[in-house]
Amino acid sequence: MGKVKSKLERKKEIQEIYDVYVNAWGGYADEPKEAPVVEIIEKIAKDVDLPPSYLFTIAAGEGLGWIYLSDLNNYKNGKVITDKKMSGFQNLGLDFFGDPQEWPNLKRYLPKTYNEGDEFESVKEVRDEAFGKETVYSANFKNLESAIWAMAAVLKQRADRFEKDWKKLKYIKPTEDEWGFWIYFYYQRPELAFQKIKELKSYDIFYLKTSDRTKIRTKALERIAAWRYIQHYNIFSK
């Protein structure tokens, strides 16, 4: 049996593979105080059939990690608080979850008891985009579990859409890295993602040679790198 690589060794290795910054988001889930989050992620990921480490990676990168879990005010008696209201806009990047056009596409991925008014409230938010300010319908959630359910539903819906598209294009099944990369791309811009894989005639995750961190391609690669690094922590079941 070979020597187990240290976190720094594994981080350097991942950086060389993907040529992007490697976020150490496993640090938001590797202590006893964060165990309630891990339990919620594991349960929901199993129900929707997503790798829990991937679900956590995307959630952490969208704000759960660096906004919510890094704030000491969100801890009490040595544990993260899970029963306080959460902004999907601020904490999970769920900018469109409360949109009447988005909600019908997501209901089938959620528990039958999950509904507007109980689990979440639609709320208008204003975000800054390259083309200017834009008003979106996000959501405020009753607690952390409701918010994670919403994130999981969006990711699973995007995963199904990606699968439908690759079958439509008669592509082979993507590798795990390709799957994770394009699910995040679909999470951000589903129409553009389909256009891109059609244009590329492949799933090439290294198609654009740029280090510009504002590009979706770079963000998606950073998510894959962070996912692989989180797996090295052995926090989640898979």
Image (tube, rainbow, N blue to C red):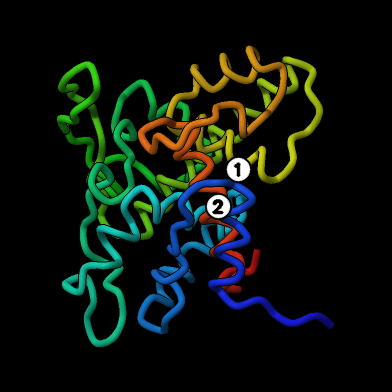
Q: In which quarter of the image is residue 69?
A: bottom left
| Residue 7 in the image, given as x and y percentages of width and height | 55, 74
Above/below status of 201 relative to 144: above
Q: Kindly report which numbered mark, 1 or 2, lies closer to the viewer in this rendering.
A: 2
Tag 2: residue type? Ala
Would residue 138 be seen by someone viewing this image from the given angle? yes
Question: Residue most toward the right?
Answer: 1
Q: What element carries label 2?
A: helix
Report the number of discs.
2
Above/below status of 140 relative to 96: below
Q: Disc 1 or 2, which lies upstream in sequence? A: 1
Above/below status of 2 relative to 230: below
Residue to which mark 2 is pinned: 225
| Residue 236 in the image, given as x and y percentages of width and height | 58, 69
Residue 234, numbered label: none
Q: Quadrant of residue 177?
A: top right
Residue at (67% x, 23% y) in the render? 164
Residue to which mark 1 is pinned: 180
Residue at (39% x, 46% y) in the render? 114
